[in-house]
Image (tube, rainbow, N blue to C red):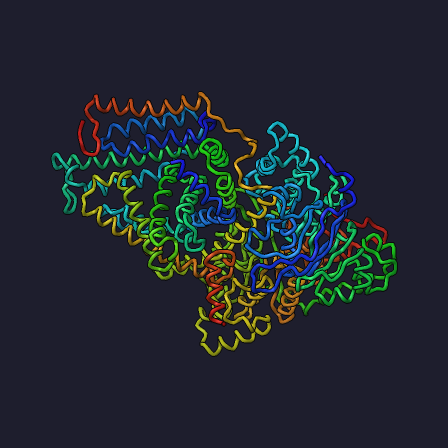
């Protein structure tokens, strides 16, 4: 355990303060943007309520919760980026007064771990679209297992649980993996990422092209 | 504390020798073979055009660069005789204080008190001493009553004073000011500069001021350094000799000279004045003639927009009450007033972005409620303070043609119009560039160009020159006046009375929710009560004029 | 009183019942604990009832939605007992109703616990306490606080973006593609700004001598005292008391197993 702790501390030392502040700021930005999706989910919920499927309204947008870890991992490209960023984003949400309270931090850690596992499987070398999508799905799987336990999905009929699981995985793949890559690439085009791994990769590609 | 008192006295505080810095190995260095020093107690002014690496130098001096950006360096910087590379992590930062340009992003805590505590904790100050230290720096900066306030609720000027206060906690030997007033309005700017000149003696600091807006700094400067766009030091010396002997050279490098110097040179005033007081004692013949360029009224014509007893409240708090205002065709109107007076709200009401809680508004003889949103936007443009907020596409071309596309224009028409606009706004080489990747000035121009797909009747600007350097400001104002000359009415919110003096035929002052003044700028300059009440600063021309007449030279209020 | 409890202890206190409640599938246990939590919130703090209700009531609707779903799609193991009523093609049994109501109340109970925390805890002190008690590294603590500070800035910026888009003639987006484009239009400027600000803030913090080392003094010394442990034991004891009472009354149901 203490070994893990020192490992974690070493990892943290290799991080620059600006990267940590950035992850925190991304948490704030997405907290604001989430509002947009929240109302979108509300609309869906209203339609689905009579059929007892109201919670699906949120399942569909669930993936947006994992986008921070995808974006951070894709931009910063260091071991732990997905885990730390998601945890930080969750902590920021708690500070902002999220009614989910401190338990959200645990959810954040679990989701972040989910995404991190996918990047770890490539030894943090591969950040192609398929890995990003996989990370989104993996985060969805982790979060679903946690949700299954904490929200009592055990009492739901297996058919429904499977349906919810599939929807959440799809949402993770699309809203976290795909959208996360799309937004980060667009961001790299603006030139603000010059000091980060993604920006540097872009720069190298451009130089090779022109050479 | 100071062990080698004698040694300290003879060696410079900072000694930079053949220092170069670059972000990337392959790219040209940002700082190029710099050698200079800063003595104890000295105030040095470092100037140079935008992009000459001035800010980079500040961060090299306290050794945050190259580590923070993985850049490279050559040569050495010595602080108190030791190579800065030999200092422990953080040690140097605890002796060199820096105040940065952007008041929004210098803090990590919510309240003033906690922000100050953050610095003290970094210094390992014992808890029992913290209270006294906080009181000391708050008093020094005149911010005592702000101790328990939230930082984000303060004005830009107040934020910068808190940034200064937290840096004073370090008891720094060297204070670096990296364009600390670039994002402040002129009145706050003057106040900040005066504050520095009072503090540096008491706190026994050397000061390095990095600036391109030199006015007001020059009088307290001991020595001037100038870097050029290649990051090389090309001039060094006492302010009077640098400014007066090398006037042409500085101009050629694109460095904006202080107004006092410009006025003195252009009017052949002797005595090399550096302050307004010296300039005036040199007897200016008539400064009005050289600066005043307010355009003549274009033939009086009809009203295009009118507000009739408009009021607006936000969260039950009244922001504007009983505002009646008419905008005439092709006029150039400035809206001025204190922070939070409701200037931007008024502009948003004019644009139809907000609905008044009472009163009526008409635009081109039609009530706002009756306008179709799409038609309204073709006739009425709005340029936001931050150009980035308006960008919605990936390329400059798409950005310019976006409105035309919405209105169903054909490709050849768009191509033609876009070409015209890109030429006019010097964006031709940037057709396929990402709007966000442009320079500050280019972004600003693009944000205006994107409003001009049709020729609008009215263009509204919310502090368009805020935080822009002098060159961008000049460029932008030229564009705005040319639009106005071609018949578009222009309304802009500003704190900068020099702009108002130069360009506007009418100025409205908003104070406590109503229009306190509406008339020509010249009339406003003769109403010191109003100027003071709205916390404005008289323009340079009016200050000199009034001083020559023997009136109070500085009509700035505290 | 609640606001003076050490934030780390408070967080831990509400996490324990929050997690353990996940095992309970009867109505009595979460209901009793919900009543206890809400009562304690009002006894130990001066949150206005109106404000509390304004924040709490939307969650009742969410809980109802969730209960309704559970009722219609209860798994066989939980759907025992008589059929009480039918709706469309669903047969609702007694067991389904009990489970559904239990899950709904459980979610409300967790909201009540969280609100007790959120409404009485100062964000800065929470972070400082995490640093001082839970040994969160200062680099993370102040890095997080530095970002959190920007909430009002970004909220404001979001509003300005909305206005700016209106000026450009972009209305509310329709359809999935429109949504994604709209998402991009908002997120790019916000994120671009976040990145620039992150760099500047980090530089400003370091230039004030911040190194991230753990050796620093503390202006706000966050302490854990007797009062904090009393608070902790009160909430944990109450939870087990409720579980025990539930057992005595014969309600207790853990993951479908009646005790």
Q: Is residue B522 left or right of residue A154?
A: right
Residue farthest toward the bottom in the current orientation of the protein = B412
Q: Which quadrant would residue B253 be assigned to in this image?
A: bottom right
Residue C242 versus residue A78 in the image, above or below = above
Q: Left or right: where does residue C158 sit relative to residue A156? A: right
Give residue A179's position: percent from left, percent from top. Answer: 37, 57
- Looking at the image, residue A44 sits to the left or right of residue C145; the answer is left
Residue A75 to residue B6: above or below: below
Pick the residue in front: B226 or B523.
B226
Q: Quick one: quadrant of the C terminus of chain C?
A: top left
Res C185 quadrant in image: bottom left
Query: Can you give x and y, in whole percent of width and height, for residue B489 in the image?
Result: 61, 65
Residue B343 in percent (x, y) is at 60, 52
Residue at 63% x, 68% y is B479
Q: Nearer the viewer, residue C2 or C50?
A: C2
Residue B224 lies, in percent from the top left, at 76, 55
Of residue B34 and residue C29, the one placed in the foreground of this image is B34
> Can residue B302 be seen in the rendering of this structure?
no
Counting labels gives: 0
Does residue B182 appear in the picture of this structure?
yes
């Amino acid at each position: 355990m203490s070994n893990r702790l020192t490992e974690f501390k070493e990892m943290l030392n290799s991080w620059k303060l600006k990267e940590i502040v950035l992850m925190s700021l991304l948490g704030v930005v997405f907290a604001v943007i989430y509002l947009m999706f929240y109302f979108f989910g509300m609309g869906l919920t209203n339609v689905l309520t009579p059929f007892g499927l109201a919670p699906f309204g949120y399942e569909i947008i669930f993936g947006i919760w994992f986008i921070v870890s995808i974006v951070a991992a894709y931009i910063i490209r260091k071991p732990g980026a997905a885990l730390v960023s998601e945890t930080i984003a969750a902590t920021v949400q708690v500070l902002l007064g999220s009614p989910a309270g401190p338990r959200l931090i645990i959810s954040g850690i679990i989701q972040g771990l989910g995404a991190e596992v996918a990047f770890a499987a490539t030894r943090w070398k591969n950040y192609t679209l398929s890995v990003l999508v996989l990370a989104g799905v993996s985060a969805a799987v982790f979060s679903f297992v946690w949700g299954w336990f904490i929200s009592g999905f055990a009492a739901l009929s297996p058919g429904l649980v499977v349906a919810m699981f599939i929807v959440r995985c799809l949402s993770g793949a699309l809203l976290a993996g795909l959208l996360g890559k799309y937004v980060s690439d667009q961001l790299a085009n603006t030139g603000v990422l010059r000091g980060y791994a993604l920006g540097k990769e872009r720069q190298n590609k451009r130089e090779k092209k022109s050479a | 504390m100071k062990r080698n008192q004698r040694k300290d006295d003879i060696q410079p505080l900072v000694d930079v020798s053949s220092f170069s810095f670059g972000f990337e190995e392959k790219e040209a260095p940002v700082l190029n073979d710099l050698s200079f020093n800063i003595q104890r107690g000295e105030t040095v002014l470092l100037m140079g055009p935008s992009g000459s690496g001035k800010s980079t130098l500040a961060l090299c001096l306290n050794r945050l660069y190259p580590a923070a950006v993985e850049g490279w360096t050559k040569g050495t910087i010595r602080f108190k005789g030791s190579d800065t590379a030999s200092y422990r992590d953080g040690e140097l930062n605890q002796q060199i204080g820096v105040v940065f340009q952007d008041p929004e992003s210098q803090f990590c805590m919510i309240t003033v008190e906690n922000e100050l505590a953050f610095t003290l904790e970094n210094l390992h100050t014992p808890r029992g001493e913290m209270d006294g230290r906080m009181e000391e720096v708050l008093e020094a900066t005149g911010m005592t009553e702000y101790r328990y306030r939230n930082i984000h609720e303060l004005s830009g000027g107040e934020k910068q004073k808190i940034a200064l206060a937290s840096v004073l906690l370090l008891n720094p030997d060297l204070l670096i000011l990296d364009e600390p007033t670039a994002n402040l309005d002129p009145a706050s700017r003057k106040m900040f500069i005066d504050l520095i000149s009072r503090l540096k003696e008491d706190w026994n600091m050397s000061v390095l001021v990095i600036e391109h807006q030199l006015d007001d700094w020059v009088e307290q400067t001991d020595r001037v350094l100038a870097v050029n766009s290649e990051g090389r030091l090309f001039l060094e010396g006492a302010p009077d000799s640098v400014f007066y002997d090398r006037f042409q050279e500085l101009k050629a490098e694109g460095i904006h000279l202080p107004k006092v110097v410009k006025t003195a040179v252009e009017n052949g005033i002797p005595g090399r004045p550096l302050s307004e007081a010296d300039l005036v004692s040199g007897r200016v013949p008539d400064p009005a003639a050289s600066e005043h360029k307010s355009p003549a009224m274009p033939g009086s014509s009809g009203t295009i927009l009118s507000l009739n007893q408009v009021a607006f409240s936000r969260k039950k708090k009244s922001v504007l009450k009983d505002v009646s205002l008419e905008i005439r065709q092709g006029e150039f109107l400035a809206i001025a007033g204190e922070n939070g007076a409701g200037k931007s709200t008024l502009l948003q009401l004019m644009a139809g972005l907000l609905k008044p809680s009472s009163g009526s508004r008409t635009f081109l003889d039609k009530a706002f409620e009756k306008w179709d949103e799409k038609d309204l936007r073709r006739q009425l443009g709005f340029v936001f303070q931050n150009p980035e907020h308006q960008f919605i596409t990936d390329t400059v071309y798409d950005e310019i043609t976006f409105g035309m596309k919405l209105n169903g224009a054909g490709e050849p028409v768009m191509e033609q119009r876009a070409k015209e606009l890109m030429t006019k706004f010097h964006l031709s080489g940037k057709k396929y560039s990402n709007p966000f990747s442009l320079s500050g000035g280019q972004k600003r121009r693009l944000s205006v160009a994107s409003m001009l797909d049709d020729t609008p009747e009215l263009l509204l600007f919310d502090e368009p020159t805020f935080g822009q350097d002098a060159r961008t400001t000049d460029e932008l104002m030229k564009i705005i006046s040319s639009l106005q000359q071609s018949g578009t009415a222009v309304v802009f919110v500003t704190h900068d009375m020099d702009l108002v003096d130069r360009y506007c035929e009418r100025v409205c002052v908003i104070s406590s929710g109503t229009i306190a003044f509406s008339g020509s700028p010249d009339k406003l300059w003769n109403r010191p009560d109003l100027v003071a009440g709205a916390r404005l600063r008289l323009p340079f021309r009016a200050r000199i004029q009034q001083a020559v007449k023997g009136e109070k030279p500085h009509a700035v209020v505290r | 009183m609640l606001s003076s409890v050490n934030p780390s202890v408070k967080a831990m206190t509400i996490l324990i019942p929050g997690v353990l409640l996940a095992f309970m599938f009867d109505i009595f246990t979460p209901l009793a604990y919900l009543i206890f939590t809400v009562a304690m919130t009002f006894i130990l703090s001066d949150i206005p009832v109106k404000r509390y209700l304004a924040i709490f009531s939307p969650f009742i609707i969410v809980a109802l939605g969730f209960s309704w779903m559970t009722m219609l799609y209860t798994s066989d193991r939980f759907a025992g007992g008589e059929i009480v009523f039918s709706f469309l093609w669903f047969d609702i049994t007694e067991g389904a109703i009990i489970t559904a109501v239990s899950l709904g109340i459980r979610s409300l109970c967790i909201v009540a616990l969280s609100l007790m925390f959120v409404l009485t805890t100062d964000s800065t002190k929470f972070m400082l306490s995490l640093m001082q008690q839970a040994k969160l590294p200062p680099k993370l603590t102040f890095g997080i606080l530095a970002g959190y500070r920007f909430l009002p800035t970004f909220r404001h910026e979001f509003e300005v973006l909305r206005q700016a888009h209106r000026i450009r003639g972009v209305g509310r987006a329709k359809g999935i593609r429109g949504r994604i484009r709209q998402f991009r239009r908002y997120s790019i400027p916000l994120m671009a700004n976040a990145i620039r600000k992150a760099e500047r803030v980090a530089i400003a913090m370091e230039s004030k001598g911040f190194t991230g080392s753990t050796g620093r003094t503390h202006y706000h010394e966050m302490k854990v005292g007797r009062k904090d442990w009393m608070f902790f034991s009160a909430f944990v004891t109450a939870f087990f008391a409720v579980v025990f009472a539930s057992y005595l009354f014969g309600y207790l149901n853990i993951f479908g197993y009646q005790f």
